[in-house]
Image (tube, rainbow, N blue to C red):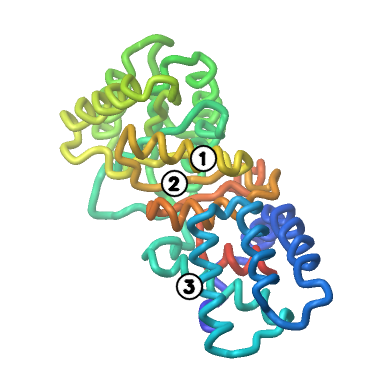
Amino acid sequence: MSFFKKLFSSEKKESLDKGLEKSKTTFFSKLTKAVAGKSKVDDEVLDNLEEILVSSDVGVNTTLKIITRIEARVAADKYLGTDELNNILQEEIASLLSETNTGEATEFVIPITTKPYVLMVVGVNGVGKTTTIGKLAYQFKKQGYKVVLGAADTFRAAAIDQLQIWADRVGVPIVRQNMGSDPASVAFDTLQSAVAQDADIVIIDTAGRLHNKINLMNELTKVKRVMQKVVVDAPHDVLLVLDGSTGQNAFEQAKQFTAATEVTSLAVTKLDGTAKGGVVIGISDQFQIPVKYIGVGEGIEDLQVFNKYEFVDSFFK
């Protein structure tokens, strides 16, 4: 079909297939039961499909859009066999995701017009934020970029130490201060260091506390303001990291963070350990914020750029 062309290397595709295995297996076992004994797509099949999509954490609003599209095809074609349902679902979800001009990347790249490119990373504790930063640093360095990390999550000593471990592992410089230091001060120092080193990309870790949204908003606003004293238009990207295995809770976190700060991209982690891979489809559609990266395993290579064509192809393979 026209939507799908091979964009990933065989190793990358294999990693994606494996990472989505649990989601795919659960989804198809439910789908098989839903169409058992049925030869055509009728109202009962569509009702069952709606339930399956919602229970796969695609989200209610996105599910309704998909069902409406399939209903339109049933009405137009008069008869759709249940054996065609898999392909139709694949086409309609790819089409839905194609309405946003995102999810088309195949490599870890940043705009060459901005230097240093400042990426600020937000997200609650436990979603894999620091690990995502470490893996991003690895991928960007592998692409030939000069990377500097900033440990501005100063509320947890573990966060600073964990980022230091990643910096050492990847072989990139890190700017850090003691636990309890002013996060904005760390961000300021990091940008000054990056400019002095002629770095290509700066990745700033920030604290992940949502219990008081006003404090979080104020803190992130201050970090941005102080960074702009060094790099006028920083940050160029605010990446929200979400744990895909939490399903609907990931939607809730996305709502909270987009209310607290201007989130410009998303990373959805831990998809390999869950049957909730549908959350990527729902979040991508509902928030109209590009999903840039997905985590499909624990290995350093298992953070991938999100490509909607490859993702849907693997999900429905």
Residue displayed at 65% across by 65% down? 47
Q: Alpha carbon of mark 3 to alpha carbon of mark 2: how far?
A: 20 Å
* Badge number at residue 242: 1
Q: Amino acid at mark 2?
A: Leu
Residue 254 sits in quarter: top left
Circle 1 residues within 10 Å: few <14, some 14–19, many ≥20: many
Q: Which label lies toward us, 3 or 2?
A: 3
In this view, the residue in front, 143 or 293, is: 293
Res 240 visible? yes
Residue at x 50% of width, y 43% of height = 251
Q: Secondary structure at mark 1?
A: strand
For label 2, count other residues whose C-alpha is less than 10 Å away and answer few (under 14), some (14-19) or many (20+): many
Front in this rendered view, residue 192 or 269? 269
Where residue 273 sits in the image (x, y, percent)? Answer: 70, 44
Q: Position of residue 204 (x, y in %)?
A: 37, 31
Look at label 1 and name its amino acid.
Leu
Asked if disc 2 and disc 1 are in contact, CB closer than 8 Å, the reply is yes
Residue underneath mark 3? 95
Q: Is residue 112 left or right of residue 265?
A: left
From the viewer's perspective, tell me whether residue 171 is left or right of residue 110.
right
- Assign a secondary structure to mark 2: strand
Q: Looking at the image, is 127 positioned above or below residue 184? A: below
* Inter-mark Cα distance, 2 to 1: 7 Å
Q: Is residue 39 above or below residue 299?
A: below
